[in-house]
Image: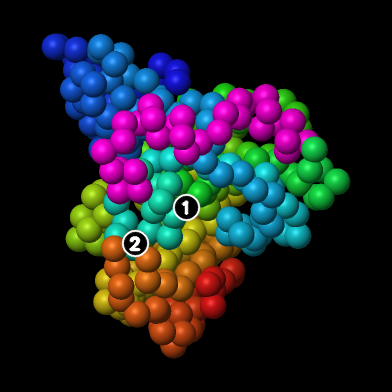
């Protein structure tokens, strides 16, 4: 573990986390909304620092990043925890540890279900895969912004090694930590889950911070946007048109947009997204965007 960044000490040993828009006020001995940032006697700690739940050499297209060094691979690492609560999460077993490991403290979860991998080891492994077209490191699988200190320390070493850093993120982060990290990041895939405040209420968040993350990130690095199309929740023609208009008008028509097919998972048993819905979204988007892709089809 490591002392967290972006928090304030408060009276009675409470702490106010300012990493993400949840802005958790955390009592002594308790963890924040993300599960992995814990208040110990008035000091906030990143409990999962230097530990990973998953690591693979993935095609860059799996992130998905289709317009960033296509055909390459990237060493991908993930931790545990997330700062949103999507009932359809495909990686809920690592993103929602309070459900995966009910009643188990974060200290025990990290010991039992993650492996130690310090930033230097991450770079060594990425370089080992260079003969396999590896171009760098992706922080993915769960939400990398909850893993902020580890991501930043690792990203510094990756850049020094002449390789790329990639974030696959829900974009739910405050502006100050985002701006501090962005100079180290070369590409991002940002998951814009829906295009209404009412939709984001369903996942425990707000829309505007996500849009702000994408708008700021576009100034620093290559970005691509993903939207998981879920029947009855964010699949209306109006929803799709609003998303496409924002991408085209704010990020630019050269910004790749991925529509991904939903399949039942975690707490949501709705039938998979009809292919006709995805093709409608593709048709709408292609009228205004240069790069539109369908995923999970």
Which numbered dot is residue 266?
2
**Above-or-below relation of 295 to 212:** below
State the image quarter where residue 129 is shown: top right
Q: Which mark is residue 223?
A: none
Q: Residues within 10 Å of mark 2 (few under 14, many from 20)?
A: some
| Disc 1 and disc 2 in contact, CB within 8 angstroms | no
From the image, tell me which residue sits under label 1: 190
Q: Nearer the viewer, mark 1 or mark 2?
A: 2
Residue found at the far left of this picture = 12
Q: Position of residue 32 (x, y in %)?
A: 27, 32
Q: Secondary structure at mark 1?
A: strand
The stretch in magenta equals 98-127
249 vs 78: above or below:
below
Q: Sequence order check: which comes first, mark 1 or mark 2?
A: 1
Q: Is residue 172 visible?
A: no
Q: Residue furthest right?
A: 131
Question: Looking at the rendering, in which quadrant would you find the C terminus?
Answer: bottom right
| Residue 237: x %, y % from top left | 33, 79
User: Can residue 273 be seen here?
Assistant: yes
Disc 1 crowd, CA 10 A, few/some/many (<14, 14-19, 20+): many
Identify the residue at image location x=47%, y=52%: 190
Q: Eyeballing the image, is 260 above or below 80? A: below
Question: How is this picture coloured?
Answer: rainbow
Q: Residue at x 72, y 52 (%)?
A: 73
């Amino acid at each position: 573990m490591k002392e967290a960044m972006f928090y304030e000490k408060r009276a009675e040993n409470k702490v106010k986390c300012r990493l993400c828009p949840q802005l958790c006020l955390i009592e002594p001995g308790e963890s924040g909304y993300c599960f992995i940032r814990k208040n110990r006697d008035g000091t906030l700690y990143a409990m999962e620092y230097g530990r990973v739940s998953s690591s693979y050499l993935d095609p860059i297209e799996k992130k998905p990043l289709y317009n960033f060094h296509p055909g390459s691979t990237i060493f991908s690492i993930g931790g545990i925890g997330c700062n949103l609560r999507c009932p359809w999460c495909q990686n809920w077993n690592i993103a929602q540890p309070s459900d995966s490991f009910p009643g188990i403290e974060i200290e025990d979860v990290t010991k039992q279900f993650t492996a130690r991998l310090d930033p230097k080891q991450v770079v060594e492994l990425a370089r080992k895969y260079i003969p396999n077209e590896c171009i760098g490191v992706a922080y993915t699988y769960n939400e990398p912004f909850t893993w902020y200190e580890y991501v930043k320390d690792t990203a510094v070493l990756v850049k020094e090694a002449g390789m790329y850093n990639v974030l696959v993120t829900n974009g739910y982060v405050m502006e100050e930590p985002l701006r501090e990290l962005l100079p180290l990041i070369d590409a991002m895939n940002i998951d814009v889950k829906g295009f209404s405040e009412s939709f984001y209420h369903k996942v425990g968040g707000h829309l505007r911070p996500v849009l702000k993350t994408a708008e700021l990130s576009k100034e620093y690095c290559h970005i691509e946007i993903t939207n998981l199309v879920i029947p009855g929740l964010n699949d209306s023609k109006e929803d799709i048109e609003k998303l496409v208009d924002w991408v085209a008008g704010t990020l630019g028509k050269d910004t790749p947009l991925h529509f991904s097919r939903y399949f039942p998972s975690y707490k949501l048993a709705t039938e998979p997204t009809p292919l006709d819905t995805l093709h409608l979204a593709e048709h709408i988007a292609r009228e205004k965007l240069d790069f539109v892709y369908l995923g999970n089809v």
